[in-house]
Amino acid sequence: MAAIANARKSRLHNAFEGLALTASLQSFPTFATAAFLLKLVADHDLVGDPGVAIFVAFASLVHATLAVTFGPSFPHLFKTVYEPKFFEAHLSLSDKITAWRTQPVASLQLVTIVLLLSVMAVVTASVG
C-alpha cells in the first residue's frame, strides 16, 4: 500500500515535502537559536515581541527556499543545508526523515542543537 502511495506522489508534492523538511529540520533550528541567543543577551527589543516568531518563520522559509533552489547546482556551498534525500520521490515522508537522521552529519547536527538549547534553557531559567 505504501509503495502505491509513493508511486503516485506528484512532483509538486515531493518538492513541497522536501522544502518543508528543509525548513523545519535544518533552517528553523538555526534561526530559533539565534533569536534565543539574542533574548539571552537581554536585547530588550525582542522581549514580548510577536514579530520574532514571524521573523523566525519567514527567515526559515527563505533560507530553505534558497537552499533548495541553489543546493543542487552548488553542492559544495550548500552541503550543510541542502539534503538530497528530502527530494527522493520514492521515499515516504517518514522514510525521508529516517534516511536523514541515520547520517553521521545529521546526527551530529541534532546532538549539537539539543545540547545548545539545553544549555540556553538552563541559563534562561537561572537568570530570570
Image (cartoon, helix red, strand yellow):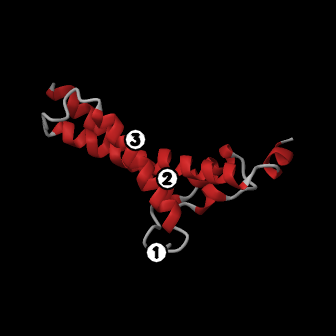
Q: SS of the residue at dot 3?
A: helix
Circle 3 is placed at which residue position?
57
Q: Is residue 29 visible?
A: no
Front residue of this view, candidates 45 and 116: 45
Identity, as a three-letter code, of the amino acid under mark 3: Ala
Q: Label 1's element? A: loop
Residue 120 drawn at (x, y percent): 26, 37
- Residue 40 percent coordinates (x, y): 18, 37
Categorize mark 2 by other alpha carbons within 10 Å: few (<14), some (14-19), many (20+). few
Q: CA–CA distance between discs 3 and 2?
A: 23 Å
User: How far apart are the two marked residues, 1 and 2, measured between alpha carbons?
Assistant: 20 Å
Does residue 59 appear to the left or right of 88 in the view shown? left
Query: Which residue is labeled 2 in the image?
Result: 107
The reply to whether dot 3 and dot 2 touch (C-beta < 8 Å) is no
49 displayed left or right of 72: left
Question: Disc 1 marks which residue?
Answer: 76
69 versus 2 height, above or below = below
